[in-house]
Image: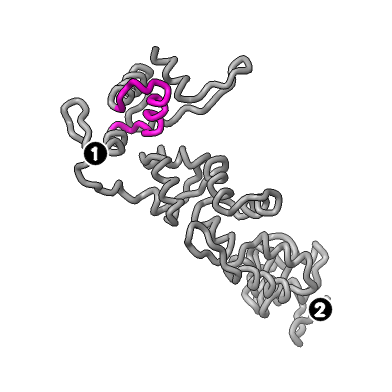
């Protein structure tokens, strides 16, 4: 059986594959799945990898909307959305590009798209879009909620929450949240050092003088919010007394000193709501 491709006739597929320097087994695979010889050869010559529906854009073939989106820096789920609703791939790409040109403001900083926002904060773009369409909330509120409740990707590693990320890098979550609200990226919020505010708030603990309460808490990897929670429950205690109480409990329960001791979550016990700092106080007494 002879095979004709690009105006030339070949006696076997093996001969044709050797002519173009491609793997004949891939041609066989496409042919078994019902592909025409021309389409199979084009896929092998262009070395189009992956599975799924075939798309062509600007003379190049792609096996999925994601591959096409990555080529042009577009959010793949948005592109897939337009491909399903547009007549041609060209129209879908154009509409997706137009949508990305509508810039987004978040904490005073301008972003090109939700995808760029998601990348900057290590969260999923699909989660942002879902909440924008289903909830009457601002983008700032949505991003803060996702940072607290959904996994975060930071420097190639995934963390369950922002609190877990802060514990890994030994920073206070409250400091990170405040920096985000001032327009800092997640990377800046994690890595920025505590600013030197002078000697107005110096505090002494166990014979050592610290610039302020934040420096003291960072030295011992104890959340400042956790100490303030104790102060709200026992206002007659000073900050140092509450700090010493938290530190003593941490040491007694064997909490690793290299990990940040964070604020306890609120719980319900026998129908009664108990605050996290109340739990700590009752454990200490």
Q: Tell me if residue 14 can be seen.
A: no
Residue furthest front as drawn: 236
Q: Is residue 221 magenta?
A: yes
Please report the residue visible at 29 percent of the width from the left and 31 percent of the height from the top: 220
Report crowding for label 2: few under 14, some 14 to 19, many 20 or more residues within 10 A (C-alpha): few
In the image, residue 85 lies in the stretch drawn in magenta = no
Which corner quadrant of the image does residue 7 belong to?
A: bottom right
Residue 2's disc number: 2
The residue at which mark 1 appears reads as: 201
Span of residues in magenta: 220-239
Mark positioned earlier in the residue sequence (1 or 2)? 2
Q: Quadrant of the N terminus?
A: bottom right
Measure the C-alpha gap from mark 1 to mark 2: 89 Å
Question: What's the residue at 56%, 40% (across, down)?
Answer: 149
The figure's colour scheme reads one colour
Q: Position of residue 141 (x, y in %)?
A: 56, 48
Q: Quadrant of residue 242?
A: top left
Question: Residue at image x 62%, y 14%?
Answer: 270
Q: Is residue 199 above or below residue 283?
A: below
CB atoms of marks 1 and 2 within 8 Å: no
- Examine the rendering and report whether any part of residue 255 can be seen: yes
């Amino acid at each position: 059986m002879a095979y004709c491709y690009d105006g030339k006739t070949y006696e076997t597929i093996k001969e044709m594959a050797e002519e173009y320097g491609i793997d004949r087994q891939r041609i066989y695979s496409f042919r078994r799945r019902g592909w025409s010889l021309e389409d199979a050869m084009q896929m092998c010559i262009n070395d189009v990898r992956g599975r799924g529906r075939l798309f062509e854009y600007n003379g190049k073939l792609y096996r999925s909307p994601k591959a096409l989106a990555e080529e042009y820096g577009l959010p793949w789920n948005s592109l897939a959305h337009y491909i399903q609703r547009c007549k041609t791939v060209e129209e879908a790409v154009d509409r997706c590009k137009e949508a990305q040109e509508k810039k987004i403001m978040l904490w005073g900083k301008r972003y090109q798209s939700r995808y760029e926002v998601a990348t900057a904060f290590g969260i999923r773009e699909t989660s942002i879009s879902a909440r924008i369409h289903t909830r009457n909330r601002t983008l700032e509120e949505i991003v803060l909620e996702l940072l607290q409740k959904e996994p975060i990707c930071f420097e190639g590693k995934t963390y369950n929450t922002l609190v877990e990320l802060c514990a890994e890098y030994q920073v206070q979550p409250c400091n990170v949240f405040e920096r985000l609200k001032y327009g800092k990226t997640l990377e800046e919020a994690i890595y920025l050092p505590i600013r030197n505010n002078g000697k107005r708030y110096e505090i002494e603990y166990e014979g050592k003088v610290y610039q302020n309460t934040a420096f003291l808490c960072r030295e011992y990897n104890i959340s400042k919010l956790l100490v303030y929670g104790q102060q709200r429950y026992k206002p007659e205690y000073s900050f140092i007394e509450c700090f010493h109480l938290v530190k003593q409990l941490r040491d007694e329960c064997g909490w690793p000193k290299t990990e940040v001791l964070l604020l306890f979550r609120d719980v319900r016990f026998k129908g009664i709501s108990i605050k996290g700092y109340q739990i700590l106080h009752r454990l200490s007494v």
